Image (cartoon, helix red, strand yellow):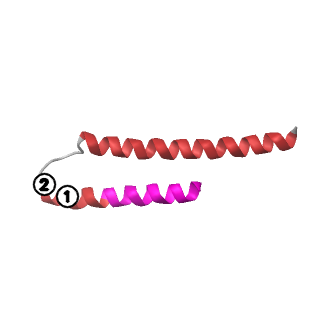
Amino acid sequence: MLMMMYRYLLAATVARLEDLRSAAGRRREHGGSTVEWVVIAAVVFLLAVAVGAKLTSVVNEHLAKIK
């Protein structure tokens, strides 16, 4: 489940970056718009939450084995 979510987020991010790269040639605007930065921040946040949840579950499993 976690790997599937990670792959989906990675594919969405790559697709978005390719869109931004192609759009950069069509417009003279430099830098990203607010919406673009919010999308990037959301992807990074979701990846951090997913990694944190996985690490927490692994630590809890090992802690249960020790007890």
Residue 18 in the image: above or below residue 37: below
| Mark 1 residue crowding within 10 angstroms, few (<14) / some (14–19) / many (20+) | few
Q: Please give left or right for residue 39 compared with residue 55 in the image.
A: left
At label 1, the amino acid type is: Ala
Up/down of 41 relative to 6, above or below: above
The answer to which image quadrant residue 10 occupies is: bottom left
User: What residue lies at 25% left-to-right and 56% top-to-bottom?
Assistant: 20
Residue 54, position as x, y percentages in the image: 63, 46
Mark 2 neighbour class, 10 Å CA radius: few under 14, some 14 to 19, many 20 or more: few
Quadrant of image for the C terminus: top right
**Residue range of the region highlighted in magenta in the rendering:** 1-17
- Where residue 49 sits: x, y (%)? 54, 41
Q: Amino acid at mark 2?
A: Arg
Write down the residue under mark 2: 27
Residue 29, position as x, y percentages in the image = 14, 48
Q: Is 38 contained in the magenta span?
A: no
Dominant secondary-structure state across the stretch colored magenta: helix
- Image quadrant assignment for residue 56: top right
Q: Which residue is mark 1?
A: 23
Q: Is residue 30 above or below residue 23?
A: above
Q: Position of residue 22 (x, y in %)?
A: 22, 62
SS type, badge 2:
loop
Q: Is residue 2 depicted above or below 56 in this figure?
A: below
Whether label 2 touches label 1, CB < 8 Å: yes
Residue 9 shown in magenta: yes
Image quadrant of residue 24?
A: bottom left
